[in-house]
Image (tube, rainbow, N blue to C red):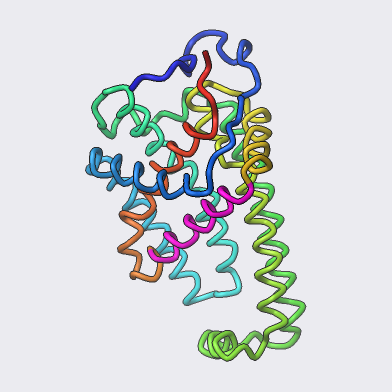
Amino acid sequence: MAQQDTPADSPGAEAALPFPNVRVIGIGAPFRWIRLGFADFRACARSSLFYGFCFTAMGLLTTFVFAHAYAYTSAVTTGFFLVAPFFAMGLYELSRRRELGLPGVLLPTLTVWRRNLGNIALFAGVLTVVFLIWARASMVIFAMFYTQEMPSLDGFLSQLLALENIDFLLVYVAVGAGFALFVFALSVVSIPLMLDRNQDAITSMLASLRALMLNPLPLLVWAALIVTLTLIGFLSFHIGLVVMMPVVGHATWHAYRELVEPLS
């Protein structure tokens, strides 16, 4: 069904846009988004699978780095979550096209970022700065707890499984979770807003922060679902990423539709 939002490529649309009106949603909404995302995946399977294989390639790169230089895995993993929303832009566009009754073909989705290039680039710049800070913080944490020689990969995994270095694990997870929550808060609806309405980056990030403030529990459930599905994808020898990540991408579009009221 067509929405009432201002077309993203209409002249002067950005200047006329009011601040997005964010709705309050129920705690069960994220599960509905996953169901709708899976329906989009089935309807646009060929195009969605292209993006799924892109995510799988990124997952394989992460695993390769972990096997050869695990101290840098946090940087590559963070890069995965940094790049993922931009790969997902094509999935948002597929969902939008399905709403409008348009064919779910791949080619138009590959350049959808051109609609609002300046603001998307600004948002990417913000995430890149956060990514660089986290990568540096990660290395500092490793240096604090491994002041002598770094253990081998097998030794490091054994320590984690045996909880022999619990202080390191607690600090690392706490700091990483803080960065992850910050990025999540900025990006709940940011890119869909920039694509769908040609909204500016600052307003889009503020709208995402407002969405989290108004819906802390539902969106924490949503974040937990994203992490769970991503982990399933990684733990299934990356095969699951082919399906899981496109479903999450499509579901994010439905999250945006439910969280942000359409323009009248």
Front residue of 23 and 34: 23
Residue 221 belongs to the span the image colors magenta: yes
Q: Is residue 90 above or below residue 166?
A: above
Residue 236 rendering spot, x and y as whole percentages: 34, 69
Quadrant of the snapshot with the N terminus: top left
Residue 125 belongs to the span the image colors magenta: no
Residue 41 rendering spot, x and y as whole percentages: 29, 44
Q: Residue furthest top?
A: 11
Residue 116 rendering spot, x and y as whole percentages: 53, 24
Residue 26 rendering spot, x and y as whole percentages: 53, 43
Task: Please name the residue shown 64% across and 43% down the image.
Answer: 212
What span is colored magenta in the figure? Answer: 216-232
Task: Please name the residue shown 27% across and 40% down the image.
Answer: 47
Left or right of residue 110: residue 44:
left
Task: Please name the residue shown 54% across and 87% down the image.
Answer: 161
Left or right of residue 49: residue 2:
right
Left or right of residue 137: residue 260:
left
Front residue of 1 and 193: 1
Q: Main secondary structure of the magenta part?
A: helix
Task: Please name the residue shown 36% across and 51% down the image.
Answer: 54
Q: Quadrant of residue 12?
A: top right
Left or right of residue 168: residue 64:
left
